[in-house]
């Protein structure tokens, strides 16, 4: 029988380790989260208890284990077209404004998790182009990044099971943008996958290699970071945005620590942030 309990001492040590590795702050009394995320690794790496697994990870004796632990703690399955309004705003307001500029549109999906967000952005762009033939003629490039290299490899395949497809995807979009795969799963169609490139990126590191963007989605990510790290991330995102570029955050997130860099633009419904010139 595997012991899945986490001692207070190991929990504190693991919290410090996780913050140093990827900026995530566990906070108090989240042992249940550590148990649920790391339990499967007990069997994969043949540990008898989570405390030993944590101790081995924190000491840095096994690089393969470290990557698996970070992947397990940072990977969340997300929704298609989450919250609705960012994608409605794209189609209704932002893409028409950008189309008038007659240049290539670059969008960044930061911390893309299991890939639903960047693919939702791609589908939104395709829908706008179908309604407006000839628009965005210079093309659309969507860059999706995440810390988990294992998750990124899955994202590139674009394979999703029935449970994943049920989370926010309409029957019409499922029919239009997916094919049945030999595995029995559904696969995002090639025309959608071609619009998205996936890259490994730690938000604590530099973003300069990504280039400049017109729109950045960094949604439901900053809530996991300490205030000073959140401020640094927002500063670096601002540096990667084109003048007057657009930033979408999650519904419960704000740019209070970087209000000198962004202006809030309220819409009906929703809102976004625009880089100050």
Image (cartoon, rainbow, N blue to C red):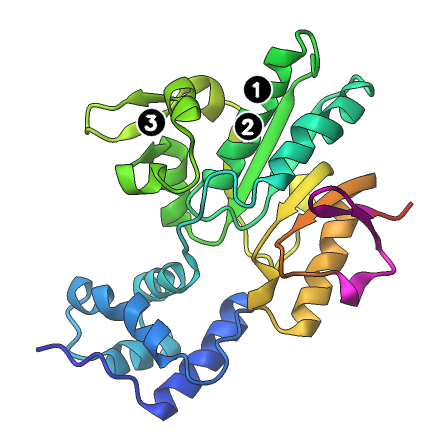
Residue 175 quadrant? top left
Furthest toward the bottom, the residue is 9
Which of disc 3 and disc 2 is earlier in sequence?
Answer: 2
Q: Is residue 204 visible?
A: no
Q: Is residue 22 above or below residue 123?
A: below
Tell me: 82 left or right of 234. Answer: left
Q: Which residue is mark 2?
A: 122
Q: Which mark is residue 187?
A: 3
Where, quadrant-wise, is the C terminus in this rendering? top right
Between marks 2 and 3, how big is the CA–CA gap?
14 Å
The structure residue drawn at horizontal position 48% and vertical position 23%, both measured from the top left corner, is 192
Residue furthest left as drawn: 1
The answer for how far apart the CA atoms under marks 3 and 1 are is 17 Å
The part of the image, by quadrant, that contains residue 55 is bottom left
The answer to whether the residue labelled 1 contacts the one labelled 2, judged by CB atoms less than 8 Å apart, is yes
Q: Residues within 10 Å of mark 3 (few under 14, many from 20)?
A: many
The residue pinned by badge 1 equals 126
- Observer able to see residue 270: yes
Numbered disc 1: secondary structure: helix
Q: Residue at x 42, y 84 (%)?
A: 29
How far from the left and from the top, in percent, is residue 119? 49, 32
Task: Give the Cα distance between marks 1 and 2.
Answer: 6 Å
Write the start and end of the magenta stretch as one range: 255-274
* Residue 122 located left or right of residue 255: left
Earlier in the chain: of badge 3 and badge 1, it is 1
Which residue is at 62% across, 58% downward?
Answer: 205
* Residue 239 is covered by the magenta coloring: no
């Amino acid at each position: 029988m595997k012991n899945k309990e986490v001692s207070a001492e190991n929990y504190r040590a693991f919290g410090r380790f996780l913050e140093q590795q990827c900026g995530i702050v566990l906070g108090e009394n989240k042992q249940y989260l550590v148990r649920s995320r790391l339990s499967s690794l007990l069997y994969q790496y043949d540990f008898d208890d989570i405390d030993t697994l944590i101790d081995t990870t924190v000491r840095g004796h096994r690089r393969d284990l470290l990557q698996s632990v970070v992947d397990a703690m940072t990977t969340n399955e997300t929704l298609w077209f989450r919250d609705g309004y960012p994608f409605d705003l794209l189609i209704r307001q932002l893409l028409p404004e950008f189309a008038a500029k007659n240049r290539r549109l670059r969008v960044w999906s930061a911390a893309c998790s299991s890939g639903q967000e960047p693919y939702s952005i791609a589908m939104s762009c395709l829908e706008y182009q179908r309604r407006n033939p000839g628009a965005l003629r210079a093309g659309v490039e969507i860059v999706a990044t995440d810390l988990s290299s294992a998750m990124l490899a899955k994202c590139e395949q674009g394979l999703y099971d029935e449970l994943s497809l049920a989370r926010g995807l309409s029957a019409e979009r499922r029919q239009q943008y997916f094919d049945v795969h030999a595995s029995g799963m559904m696969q995002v169609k090639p025309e959608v996958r071609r619009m998205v490139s996936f890259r490994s990126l730690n938000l604590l590191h530099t973003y300069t290699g990504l280039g400049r963007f017109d729109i950045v989605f960094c949604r439901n990510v900053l809530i996991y970071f300490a205030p000073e790290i959140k401020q640094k991330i927002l500063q670096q995102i601002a540096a990667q945005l084109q003048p007057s570029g657009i930033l979408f955050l999650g519904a419960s997130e704000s740019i209070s620590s970087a209000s000198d860099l962004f202006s809030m633009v309220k819409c009906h419904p929703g809102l976004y942030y625009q880089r100050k010139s």
